[in-house]
Every structure is written in structure tokens, then in C-alpha cells.
Amino acid sequence: MTSYFSWLSGLRIYFQRQVLIIFVLGFSSGLPLMLVFGVLSFWLREAEVSRADIGYFSWVAMAYAVKWLWSPLADNLKIPLFHHLLGRRRSWLLVSQVAVAIAICCMAFTDPQQDLALMAALAVLLAFSSATQDINVDAYRIEIAEVEMQAALAAAYLTGYRLAMILASAGTLWLAALFSQSSDYDLSGWQHAYLVMGLCMLPGIITTLLSKEPVSVLKQQNTAHGSMITRFAAWLKQAVIAPFTDFFSRYKWHALLILALIACYRMTDVVMGVMANAFYVDMGYSKEEVASVSKIFGVIMTLIGAALGGVLINQFGIMKVLFAGAILSAATNLLFSALSQIGYDLMWLTLVISADNLSAGIATSAFIAYLSSLVNLAFTATQYAMFSSLMLLLPKFTGGFSGQWVDQFGYSTFFMMTAAMGLPVLILILLLAKADSSGRTTKVSAAKVKTEEIS
């Protein structure tokens, strides 16, 4: 009985003010991601935008991969007027959140059939604003409470983020179907859906206005000294140069193999994913069907796969699960190739998406654990951010050409091509496993697996 009450007492932490704030801000962070990439590609394909152009649209998501480039601005640049009213961190949060809401609403009033260039510009604005919001929400989460609170804050952030992703993906598709006047393309359905999503940014904006500036930030503002150039030079040395030199000094020539693996590991699923929604439209699946099977059921299977990946890592070690995950990710792309030959079949779609998301969960869980094992605790945030950015750059860039490949070769061959992209990954894993007999790059506890990065 005592343990029962102590367990209930432990749950009280999730109702503390800071935790509730981070939950809402996590929701605000998770909302734009699917609107700038996932469901947007469904909208574009329904509007008869070419697959090649949809592929190019995927490049806007690269903003999330390079957001560390402008992250120093959030620590050093004061936003006029807002800085004096809200403080540095909340002023950046508010401006980025308002920019996200405006970009979403402006996209709602844009017809991709009439002005595709404007839609592309607004998508870039949304991605840039969303990535900037992520930078500041992460910083706010770290600064708002002591170390003892960080686990609860991270859990609250992850919960809010995932709920927002489900709302922005499945919710947008359902709303677009609800407000559509016909089963064919109806602009008004998408307009209403995106306007509702824009309004969903209000809780985050209100939370930012009602919250307090972190005490640590106020102290930094009061004790800041030296010129901007001096502080930037110090930041550059500590935050960029030192983490790189540390990484190469620890792993020597193995570092090149490691970086190659990081750059290639997610190639199969990311490149395939660019054309996934266009594929569903071309196969005749409705928005409601895709929302139910892909956006909700798929997310659940991803989380199950991630949990299973953690169990397998404890049992067999990272490198073996990393290798198995790469095989599974490539193999499930072959299932999509088979589905393209079968045609419209809701049962087969459910089975293929289930297998794909389960495999992705296992693979990503192992990959995140591997990345976590590589960092030096002295540079944890910087090195991990750089690794996570590198893992998206090449796949996102390559994915931009996916529409052209589908037009030229067809879906079946395209999916087989993406499966073949997994072969270099398998070779790199085998080389690393052989080269690093000490296993120093693979030792990591299950507690370090950052499931919040799974996507």
C-alpha cells in the first residue's frame, strides 16, 4: 500500500506548472512538422501537382536538419521591443510561434494549382519558423527547471509533440475530408483544415505570454559582458570547433566510417517517405483511409517498434540490431513495391504500413542509441545535434529527386531502388564492427535511447 501511494505521489510532478508549460510548448513544436511535409504532399498530389515538384518540396524540411546554424542567434541577438517586454527566450518563442501561425494560415489561402511558387515560399517560411521555435523550446525546457526536473519535462514535451503530430497529420486529413464538398479535389476542404491548424497554435502563444522568463536567462542577461564578436568567437571555438576535434581525436580514421554510416543509414525510409503520400493518392486511397491506417496506426506501430528495439539492444547489443534494422527497413520498401503491383487494397495497405513502421521503430531506436554512444559527455548537446543533422541532410537532399524517379521508372522500380540504397549501409556496419573490436562506439545503456527523436 505504501508503494502504491508513493507511486501516486511520484505522478504529481507531471502536474507542476513548469511541466504543464512544456507539455503545451511541446504540442506547439510538433504541430508544424507534418503540415510542412507530410499532409502537404497529399494536398499537392490531390491538386495534381507533379510528383517531381512534390519531391522538390521535400527540401524545405532540410531547415530542421540545419537549424543549429542559426541557433547562436537565439542566445545572443535581442529582438527589438519584444526583448524588453518578455525577455530574450520568450521573445524568440513568441515571434517564432506567431510566424508559424501566420505561415499556416497564409498557406490555407493559397491554391497550389494557381500559385505553386507562393505555396513553396510559405512552406519555407513555415519550416524556418518551426525550426526556430524548436531551438527555443528546447532551450526553454532546459533553462526553466533544475536537473532533477528534466526527465519529467522531457516526457511532457514528447507527449505534447506526439499528440500534435497525430492531430496535424490524421486530424488535417479528416478535416479536409469533412469540409470537402466532393470526393475529388476540393480546395475549400484543405483551406478549412489548415486554418484550424493555424488556430491550434494559440495555446502555445498564450502559454508563452503567461509563462515566466527562465531565471538562468535573466542572470545571463544581467551579467553579460564583452562584445558580440568576442562572445561569438568564444561560442564558435567551444560549440563548433571543440566538438569536431574531440570526435576525430577519439575515433581517428574510424570517424570517416562513422560519419558515412550516419549520413546513409536513414536513406531508404526517408527517400521512400517523400513519395509515400503521393503514392497513396495515386493508388486511390481516401484521406480518411490514410489518416486511419498511416497516421494513427502507423505511429502506434512505430512506438511499438521503438520499444521492441530497446529490448533487442539490451539482449543483442547495438550493432547487431542496427544491422537487422537496416535489413528490415530495406525489405519493407520491397513490400511497397509489391503493393504498387497489387493496386488498391486496404488490408494489404494496413499490413505493409504496419511492417514498415514496426521496422522503422526498431531501426531508429538502434540508430539513436548508436548516436548517443558516440558523444562525449562534455559536448553532448552539440555533438548529438550535429549527428542528428547529418543523418537527415543526404537523405532529404536525395529525396528531392524522388518524384523524377517515379515519373521515369514507376512506383514499383522506385521502391526497389530505395531498398537497394540500404546495401552500402550494411557494408559500413560490417566494416565498423570489424574495425572497432573494442566495441567502444557501441556501449550505451537503454536509458540513453532518445525515443523523442523517432519520426
Image (tube, rainbow, N blue to C red):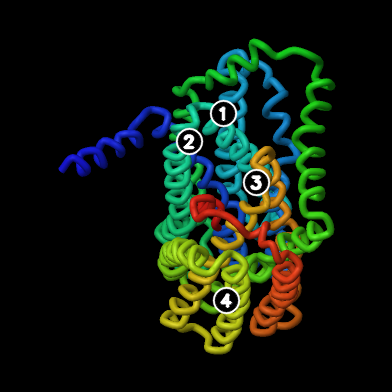
Question: Which of marks 1 and 4 precedes in the sequence?
Answer: 1
**Numbered disc in front, either 3 or 4:** 4
What's the mark number on residue 150?
Answer: 2
Question: Which of marks 3 and 1 precedes in the sequence?
Answer: 1
Q: Is residue 149 above or below residue 424?
A: above
Check contact, mark 3 vs mark 4: CB within 8 A: no
Check contact, mark 4 vs mark 1: CB within 8 A: no
What's the mark number on residue 94?
Answer: 1
Front in this rendered view, residue 264 or 308: 308
Question: Which of marks 4 and 3 precedes in the sequence?
Answer: 3
Question: Which of marks 3 and 2 precedes in the sequence?
Answer: 3
> According to the image, label 3 marks what residue?
127
Horizontal relation, residue 418 to residue 90: left or right: right
- Residue extending farthest to the top is 222
Which amino acid, by three-letter code, is at mark 2?
Gln
Front in this rendered view, residue 117 or 320: 320
Disc 2/disc 3 C-alpha distance (Å): 27 Å
Q: Secondary structure at mark 4?
A: helix
> According to the image, label 4 marks what residue?
328
